[in-house]
Amino acid sequence: MPIPPLKNHIVLVSRQALPSLLGASFPGSGPVHIHAVVTPAMKGAAHLLRKALEARGRQCAFTEYPLADSSDQNAIYNSWSHET
């Protein structure tokens, strides 16, 4: 059964990039846009994830969404509300 193409892939950036990398690397079904939620501590991990995707030949949009405090779940919505 073929996997349908993804348009958007949302990742919570962590030190374990493999799940995000695998999810975005299925042949023929990779996303058009990756949305990465990134805390300040994970900024470097987001950069590595982006480089790993590029090294695998993934040519898709990659947008980072900062999350200033990972214990405040409303912070992410507040930071995005300025973009829309």
Image: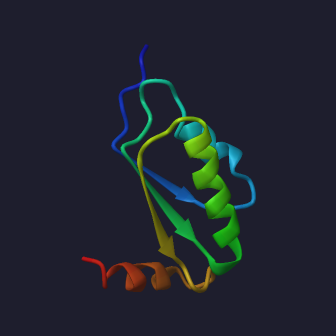
Q: Residue at x 60, y 85 (%)?
A: 69
Report the colour scheme. Answer: rainbow
53 or 7: which is nearer to us?
A: 53
67 or 27: which is nearer to us?
A: 27
Q: Residue furthest left?
A: 84
In the picture, measured across the screen, residue 21 lies left or right of residue 9, that is right
In the picture, measured across the screen, residue 23 lies left or right of residue 33, that is right
Q: How many marks?
A: 0
Q: Can you say whether 21 is above or below 37 in the image?
A: above
Q: Quadrant of residue 43?
A: bottom right
17 or 60: which is nearer to us?
A: 60
Q: Residue at x 33, y 43 (%)?
A: 7
In the rendered image, residue 54, in percent from the top left (x then y), is placed at 56, 44
67 or 62: which is nearer to us?
A: 62
In the rendered image, residue 35, in percent from the top left (x then y), is placed at 44, 59
Q: Residue at x 42, y 29 (%)?
A: 29
The quadrant of the image that shows the C terminus is bottom left
Q: Can you say whether 79 is above or below 27 in the image?
A: below
The quadrant of the image that shows the N terminus is top left
Q: Quadrant of residue 12?
A: bottom right
Q: Residue at x 64, y 46 (%)?
A: 52
Q: Quadrant of residue 25?
A: top right
Q: Can you say whether 65 is above or below 35 in the image?
A: below
Q: Residue furthest right?
A: 15
In the rendered image, residue 64, in percent from the top left (x then y), is placed at 48, 67
